[in-house]
Image (cartoon, coloured by chain):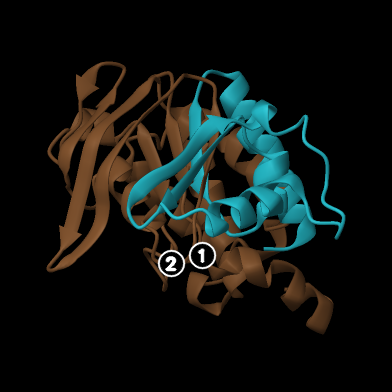
């Protein structure tokens, strides 16, 4: 999908949610998850590893290496065995 | 719709794809499901849509969901990784078929279809067979069909399950290489 399509899809997803619909999607692109979600569900080996509102992460700052909040969360989870 | 997942598990032979997954999503929320390859994301979304059945339970607004719950399944718009159900149909015909499957093919949906085709830059392609589209274009056409469903039906609170796949990774790569996708 092209950038215009992504922009339009995000708008449609937010509009659907505003109408009371529930929207679920999976993605490997963390930037998309950071800009299009109310909650995050991280699954690891078939189990829930993390489930929380996105707002709980938004107070965190980006890493010294420029990594995003979600990138840091994944690194943290990776270094902590399930 | 409020979605409640309780102790959801799914095995494929000896492989445990989901293992006791429990959580609740409130109406109007957008949930991003993340995880490494093979973590269970796709299986989870397939369970939500009824494509596969696991043990445990999924409830929509308190009503327990099974693969035979056709009334509930019509409220769930599911887009899998490879979304072309009718490859030889044109884009417009494909959308019409999807709307018919969801019993949402009435004239009231036409303005919405037009809006979605325009939004996804698909208007010049409405007479093109789905199989002749690029992967990104085909995905947008499939999305347009499912997004149109919700306004054509009288049921409130649909769930839009958007399957993940390599397309998300390829979006900008394809754009960068060719200038279009």
Which of the 4 image quadrants contains residue B28? top right
Q: Residues within 10 Å of mark 1 (few under 14, many from 20)?
A: some
Alpha carbon of mark 1 to alpha carbon of mark 2: how far?
8 Å
Q: Is residue B38 visible?
A: yes
Which of the 4 image quadrants contains residue B62? top left
In the rendering, what colour is chain B?
brown
Q: Given contact means CB atoms under 8 Å apart, are the residues at marks 1 and 2 in contact?
A: yes
Check residue B165 in the rendering and tell me which mark sits there, or answer none. 1
Residue B162's x, y, as percent? 49, 48
Tell me what residue is drawn at x 55 percent, y 66 percent.
Answer: B138
Left or right placement of residue B156 versus residue B168 in this view: left
Q: Of callouts 1 and 2, which one flags the residue occurring earlier in the amino acid sequence?
A: 2
Residue A44's x, y, as percent? 41, 54
Tell me what residue is drawn at x 64 percent, y 48 percent.
Answer: A73
In which quadrant is the C terminus of chain B drawn?
bottom right
Tell me what residue is drawn at x 73 percent, y 40 percent.
Answer: A35
Left or right placement of residue B43 versus residue B68 in this view: right
Tell me what residue is drawn at x 14 percent, y 68 percent.
Answer: B14
């Amino acid at each position: 999908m092209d950038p215009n399509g992504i922009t339009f899809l995000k708008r449609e997803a937010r509009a659907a949610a505003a109408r009371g619909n529930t929207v679920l999607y999976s993605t490997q692109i963390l930037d998309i998850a950071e800009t299009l979600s109310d909650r995050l569900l991280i699954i690891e080996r078939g189990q829930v590893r993390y489930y929380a509102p996105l707002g709980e992460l938004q107070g965190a700052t980006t890493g010294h290496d420029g990594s995003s909040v979600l990138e840091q969360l994944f690194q943290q989870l990776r270094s902590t065995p399930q | 719709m409020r979605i409640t997942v309780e102790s959801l598990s799914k095995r494929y032979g000896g492989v445990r794809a989901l293992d006791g997954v429990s959580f609740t999503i409130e109406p109007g929320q957008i949930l991003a499901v993340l995880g490494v390859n093979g973590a269970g994301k796709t299986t989870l979304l397939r369970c939500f849509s009824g494509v596969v059945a696991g043990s445990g339970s999924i409830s929509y607004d308190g009503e327990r969901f099974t693969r035979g719950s056709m009334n509930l399944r019509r409220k769930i718009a599911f887009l899998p990784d490879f979304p072309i159900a009718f490859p030889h149909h044109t884009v417009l015909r494909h959308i019409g078929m999807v709307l018919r499957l969801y019993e949402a093919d009435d004239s009231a949906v036409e303005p919405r279809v037009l809006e979605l085709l325009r939004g996804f830059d698909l208007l010049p392609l409405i007479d093109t067979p789905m199989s002749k589209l690029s992967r990104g274009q085909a995905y947008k056409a499939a999305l347009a069909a499912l997004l149109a469903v919700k306004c054509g039906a009288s049921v409130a609170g649909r769930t839009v399950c958007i399957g993940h796949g390599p397309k998300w990774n390829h979006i900008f790569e394809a754009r960068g290489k060719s200038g279009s996708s």
